[in-house]
Amino acid sequence: MGSESAIICIGAQRAGTTWLYRVLKENGLRVGHQKEVDYFRYLGNYDRGFDWYVDQFPKSKGPLIDITPEYAIASEAPDLIERSFGLECKILFFVREPLSRIESAYQKHRRNGEINCSLEFFAKYDWDSCVQRSLYSDTIQRFSRFKKLEVLVYEDMRFDSIGWANKVAEIFELSPSVIDVGKQFNPSLRSGGLASFLNPIYRPLSKFGGVRSLKSSLESLAVVNRLLYPEPSETNTLELPRSVVELLHQDRDKCSKLINRNLNDTWGS
């Protein structure tokens, strides 16, 4: 439609998409005014029309950058994206070790006061939020029609920070020096730091726009960011039913073949 081009990050949740949004926004790229435009879903904003969609991004040069994790599990998303931008559209899919992603999602829902149950109960009764979002192979297969599909592994941000920075810089035509892999945004409860103490104060005040802007400005400062969100430890101490773990391991093997990378080397066997 028209002369617009796009880079679309389809998720996954809890795999670095908020980090990407903040870093790109700090560097003046054409990301949405809000992180998740959520256009390419029938249950999202698709009925508002393409003109509405474009208006959600700054009126500047370069491709618009849509970061909406919900697209990963919306079966219609590939068709709707192709309809608007064609098969040359660049698609980014961030993936994270499935058990860590599930625990992070669980901790986030707890932090936000949305659940108060065990992880096992969460997995059983909220399959979509807990497990389905960690089964990446189906998403990769559905979006494989796009010639510029890139799958980025979250753990590389920590264990191969130079390679991660170079890859992100290449995708968005930035200097690797501006890709700060040390910053964290939207962490889980296990991150600790000052954020664990300040979050209960921030949440009731977050409805005021000025408070959100102040939080974003403070988080963007490297020193403050490290005080708020110190380096997390990968614990994976919470337990999932054995059947779920086996399903996740089977999906990992499928993903390894699809992206031609042995994810056991990164995520453990």
Image (spheres, grey):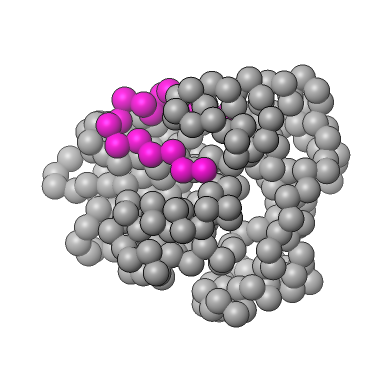
Q: Residue at x 80, y 31 (%)?
A: 240
Please state, as top left, top right, bottom left or bottom right, where the C terminus lies in the image.
top right
Please state, as top left, top right, bottom left or bottom right, where the N terminus lies in the image.
top left
Residue 125 showing in the rendered view: no
Front residue of this view, candidates 3 and 193: 193
**Please, which residue is most extreme toward the front here?**
265
Q: Residue at x 83, y 40 (%)?
A: 238
- Whole-percent x, y for residue 48 in the image: 34, 43
Q: Residue at x 68, y 72 (%)?
A: 228
Q: Quadrant of residue 132?
A: top right
Residue 145 position (above or below residue 235): above
- 171 relative to 214 in the view: left or right: left
Q: Residue at x 59, y 27 (%)?
A: 252
Residue 246 position (above or below residue 10): above
Tell whether position 146 is magenta.
yes
Question: Which region shows up in magenta?
Answer: 134-153
Q: Quadrant of residue 78?
A: top left
Residue 211 position (above or below residue 133): below
- 262 relative to 169 in the view: left or right: right
- Whole-percent x, y for residue 3 in the image: 14, 47
Q: How many marks?
A: 0
Residue 79 position (above or below residue 10): above
Tell whether position 73 is magenta.
no
- Whole-percent x, y for residue 191 in the image: 73, 60
- Whole-percent x, y for residue 131 in the image: 67, 30
Front residue of this view, candidates 126 and 51: 126
